[in-house]
Image: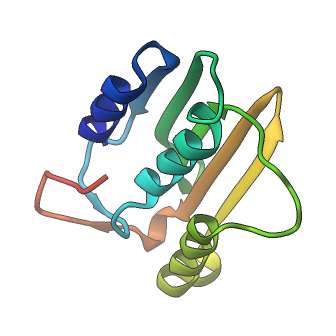
Amino acid sequence: MSEYLALEKIRFEERLNYTLDNEIKESLYIPPFLIQSMVENAIKHGISKSSREGEIKISVYYSADSLIMKVINTGEYKENGKSGIGINNTMRRLEIVYGENAGFEIKNEDNRVKSHIWIKKQQLKHTENESSNN
């Protein structure tokens, strides 16, 4: 993820500021590119459409009984009742892999777009490999 963000920072220069806060120390298996898909949407629908400086904050942490992956960005989510391909794919992938033990939400709050994925801890699989696609 940090490599992808570094490339986008070169592309958007001062228009893109980001923070990446990962509190998870162990290596977990999650479906590839879940977080990256959320960040790509934040850049495509938030940062790239604005001539002003934008910010993306990515957080990954445990909360109570779930893993939380959160992306907050400047911009506005157009809630028109229809979701784009990225959102639909994310929701479908979570449903296939985790059923009701995971979910996705996106909303406007405090002049920001907040999206997050939650996965119940008991559904997470630890990996022996310390590298991750996310």
Q: Give the total number of marks visible in the rendering.
A: 0
Indicate the quadrant where residue 20 lies: top left
Q: Residue at x 29, y 59 (%)?
A: 28
Q: Is residue 134 left or right of residue 116?
A: left
Q: Residue at x 88, y 61 (%)?
A: 80
Indicate the quadrant where residue 6 lies: top left
Please say whether residue 70 is visible from this viewpoint. no
Of the pair 47 and 19, the residue shown nearer to us = 47
Q: Residue at x 51, y 78 (%)?
A: 93
Q: Is residue 129 above or below residue 75?
A: below
Q: Residue at x 60, y 71 (%)?
A: 85
Q: Is residue 7 left or right of residue 56?
A: left
Q: Is residue 96 left or right of residue 49?
A: left
Quadrant the N terminus occupies: top left
Q: Is residue 34 left or right of residue 86?
A: left
Q: Is residue 126 above or below residue 116?
A: below
Q: Position of residue 52 (x, y in %)?
A: 64, 16
Q: Position of residue 38 (x, y in %)?
A: 53, 52
Indicate the quadrant where residue 22 lies: top left
Task: Find the residue positioned furthest to the left.
Answer: 129
Of the pair 17 and 119, the residue shown nearer to us = 17
Q: Position of residue 55 (x, y in %)?
A: 56, 23
Please say whether residue 46 is visible from this viewpoint. yes
Q: Is residue 128 above or below residue 8?
A: below
Q: How is the image coloured?
A: rainbow
Q: Is residue 22 above or below residue 53?
A: below
Q: Position of residue 8 (x, y in %)?
A: 36, 33
